[in-house]
Amino acid sequence: MGNKMTQELTPVQQERLQEQQTRYTQPAFLMQLGFVGILALTPLVIPSFRVMDVVAKIMIFTVVVASYDLLLGYTGIFSLAHGMFFGIGAYSVGLIIHHSGAPHWYHLILAILVAVGLSVALSLVITFFSLRVKAIFFAMMTLALAEFADILAVTWYDLTLAEDGVSFSLPGIFNVNWSVGKFLAADINGRLMTYYLILIIAVLLFVGILRFVRSPVGRVLKSIRDNEQRSVALGFKTLRYQVLSTVFSSAIASFAGILFAMWLRFVNPTSVLSINPLMLSILLMLIIGGMGTLYGAIIGAAFIMIIETWLPELQKLGVALFPNLEFAQRLVGRWELYFGILFILVVFFFPKGFVGTARNIIAQRKMVSSESK
């Protein structure tokens, strides 16, 4: 009976059925599971707040970059307002808790509702007025909107405290004063609980983006990116799919902004709304990891966060190696220069990003081996 039902399925349905049956035994799934396990064990075996801080930011920006990859890499929409939605999420939790006084659990729920609601509403406005404008004109319109949001945050001092920023605390087990002792090399405190909350939500959001991309909607988005006119000829309402992609990616970015604010317990326009460095960093992470790959978001976020954290240490190294040579110390301390050189080398040797180039090499080798057979 089972074999008869399998034979009645189309080749595509049979392939999907086989994929579902072997999904949890594939080496790729086991590698992903192992990677999540490493992230979970990192703060327990490495007693360093700096390491935990970098890993937490990598997880957060992986979600942001993956959501931007959905927009640019899979749908072909070049928006410069994606960082604005990240800032909306961050400011939602920061302002609600700051202006409410003592933090409560319902503040976090309210922040999620406000952030997602504002992000969805603004993304709908952007798509309604801007998606009919193509290419660079759409990018310029989103850039103007992002700059407006940044200027609003800087000038509305009574609400946002401008560049002074908003500091706040979190409720319950996420409060910095909460602690119950030690486990292995880690202190079980509010900071560690926040780290694991970020880990859980980041994994769920990333899996949600993967499911979205692999769904029939995701396949339509790829066809729109590759050839929008052909998609229209096939009968797809391309504007509806572009709106859906924009709204979904914006909501995910606002979730990531909430996580970022919870981790820092501080928000200001420079850290969560600015085009430079925030939006520029997101774009660099996407290019380095590889557009249209999703998994490249992990590589890109890790590359940028690690470089930005430890490359400035070259200045200390220069002082230690050249204590009497001021010129050599200054030359070694110009870490931005070396970062630029690294980025140029990455783009030169990995034109489609780390993951995209790796996939091309693997595909070429498979093609060569199949032809040789």
Image (tube, helix red, strand yellow):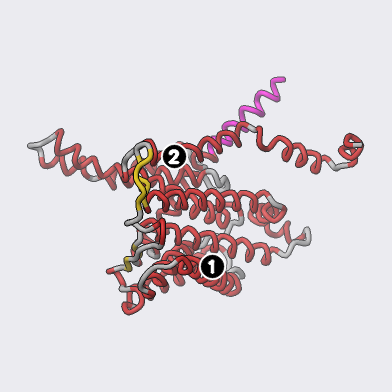
Q: CA distance from mark 1 to mark 2?
A: 38 Å
Q: Is residue 173 left or right of residue 336?
A: right
> Which span of residues is magenta-colored?
357-373
Disc 2 on helix, strand or loop? helix
- Quarter of the picture containing the N terminus is top right
* Magenta stretch: dominant secondary structure: helix
Kind of residue at badge 1: Val
**Can residue 286 be seen?**
no
Q: Is residue 33 left or right of residue 217?
A: left
Residue shown at 34% from the left, 63% from the top: 266
Residue shown at 76% from the left, 37% from the top: 18
Indicate the position of residue 114 as horizontal and vertical percent values: 51, 71
Q: Which mark is residue 116?
A: 1
Q: Is residue 24 magenta?
A: no
Q: How many marks?
A: 2
Mark with earlier residue (1, 2)? 1
Q: Quadrant of residue 359?
A: top right
Q: Is residue 372 magenta?
A: yes
Q: Which residue sits furthest left?
A: 324
Q: Quadrant of residue 234?
A: bottom right
